[in-house]
Image (tube, rainbow, N blue to C red):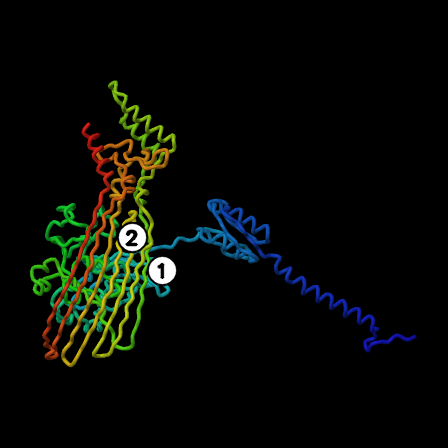
Amino acid sequence: MMKELSKTGYSLAVIQAIALRMAFACWLLFTTFPILAQEHSVSLHLNHVSLLEAINEIKRQSNLNLMYSDEDVKSVTDITVNVDNVTPEVALTACLSGTNLVAQKQNGVFVIHLRKKEKKIKLTGKVMDSKDGSPLAGATVFIMKNDKRTVGTAATLDGDFSLEVPADTKEVVASYIGYKNKSVKVVANKPLQIFLEENSNSLNEVVVNGYSSVKRTSFTGNAVTVTKDDLLKVSTRNMIDVLQVYDPSLRIAVNNEMGSDPNSLPEFYIRGRSGVGVMELDKDAVSQSALSNNPNTPIFIMDGFEVSVSKVYDFDPNRIERITILKDAAATAIYGSRAANGVIVIETKAPVAGRVQVSYNFTGALTVPDLSDYDLMNAREKLEAERLSGYYDNDSYDFSLQAEYQKKMNNILKGVDTDWLSKPLRDQFNHTHSLYIEGGSKDLRFGLDLKYDNQNGVMKQSFRNRVGAGFYIDYRIKNLQIRNQVSYDVVNAKNSPYGTFSEYTKKSPYVRYKDEDGNFLKSLEFGENSDAGKNPLYEAALKNFDKNGYTDLTNNLSVNWYIREDLYVKGQFALTKRDAHSKVFYDPDLHIIAAAHEQIACR
């Protein structure tokens, strides 16, 4: 029987066998390709290992060629990395992330070496007005990187600045309120002279002095204007803390005794002090929440009406349009002798005509006490320091000091090591809510605002809560404008029953504050002065309280009659009802303890 032959001379069976083998080879190639591709993938799950261990693990899973210095690699001992099915290069980069090492590929070998330190140069110069060459104190000089401000500084009173920047910096930017921003090229080893031009838009700006609005170009006095956006860039809590950032002549006096108490108002002044402040003259006779008798305090004018310091302190910053600080003879000429310490004019946001608009603002802040400056000894170290100082040495036959030393040592052996600084403190999350509704037509506009502000102090159980509502109406008919603003505010505050923080700084760590049953001791075992034996934690557990607050109802009415474009008559009427309350209660047990301490002191 004859076999069938193909045109090439091969039998069909041979051709089928060759085709079958080629198909099997193709199948084998495509099925083994993923295996070959995954042959060098790396998966790392390492926690707190040395860099050398991480490198060895990468080598074990791949054939990556590495070159490094043992001295550089051994110094890195805390590596945590979690990656799955990545290339060896990616795994190596993940291991070096956050270290001072970097890997570079050279001729197929990855070389690990130290990162090069960024070289920096120091720039100096002066920022001046382009017209008269006068220095611009407080002007900001900074560099831009990826459309963001990175390094910056502020000019001194003489307009001088000093700034350390990377060596590859090409230019710096200078800015000042009311002036155009200007970019200047950096010249090595040469002081920069930056001249800023006045912004053309600022020519139409006005200075609000509380009675009228005057063009800035026509105003001969010294005034600093701060807008709402400028305020919120620095702080959203209250405006008093922010103003000193924008005006170097306004300063807030630091009072370490009051600390971060939410119920204490800061003492501040403009252009120096004209007299001794009440905080220094008589601290106990003046409430912490009222500084109206302070001879250094400027006056506050809000929408043409004078308001108290506490009103400004509790006011919602989101309702402010701008603030103008008047601090020279021009302010005195308008307001008389009461403006000797300066005038701060506040202009609130007026309703905008049109459709009804609703605005809601929420501000959250975490308040944490900072005890990093207190580097104190523990109980054993404190007792040993007392012994080495000779405190317990006595040449007489009085062994009371030795007995006191043994009592303190027994407390230490029992595990007593009291961290007194942390006892009265806490971490708090404070939040502020404000709701504003506005609308109306061209002739009749209205505004309604609601606010709630919760401010808890770092001292336990201290707080200051504010709740307020306000209604604003602006009616205009021909040349007559009538504005009426009604506000109602309720403020409730409570001082901490834990006393002052300074009491806890005087306590020693080997002193017990609880007995064996876990109850607070009425008196402490050891004390170096008359009140050191008091246990402030026991006193805080009593029913003492110190509460205060006020309710304020204000109705401000103003009428403006515009006779001509450059002449108008203004009338104002203000009605304010303020009810302040203060409640202080001392538990009877507190007086018994105080009497016992007095008897001990007399002995």
Q: Spot the residue most to the front.
A: 588
**422 is higher (above) or lower (below) than 97:** above
Question: Closer to the camera, 29 or 9?
Answer: 29
Q: Spot the residue most to the bottom.
A: 478
- Which kind of residue does numbered mark 1 sit on? Asp
**Labelled disc at residue 168:** 1
**Gap in angstroms between the C-alphas marked 1 and 2:** 47 Å
Please state the horizontal and vertical placement of residue 273, each as a whole percent of the image: 13, 53
> Residue 105: in sight, yes or no?
yes
User: How many discs mark residues in the rendered view?
Assistant: 2
**Which residue is rendered at x = 76% and y = 67% of the image?**
21
> Residue 160: in sight, yes or no?
no
Please state the horizontal and vertical placement of residue 267, each as a whole percent of the image: 18, 52
Question: Closer to the camera, 45 or 93?
Answer: 45
Question: Closer to the camera, 372 or 79?
Answer: 372
**127 is higher (above) or lower (below) than 12:** above
Crowd tier of the residue under label 2, counting other residues whose Cα lies within 10 Å: few below 14, some 14–19, many 20 or above: many
Tell me the quadrant of the picture where the N terminus can be found: bottom right
- Which kind of residue does numbered mark 2 sit on? Asn
**Labelled disc at residue 456:** 2
Mark 1, secondary structure of its residue: loop
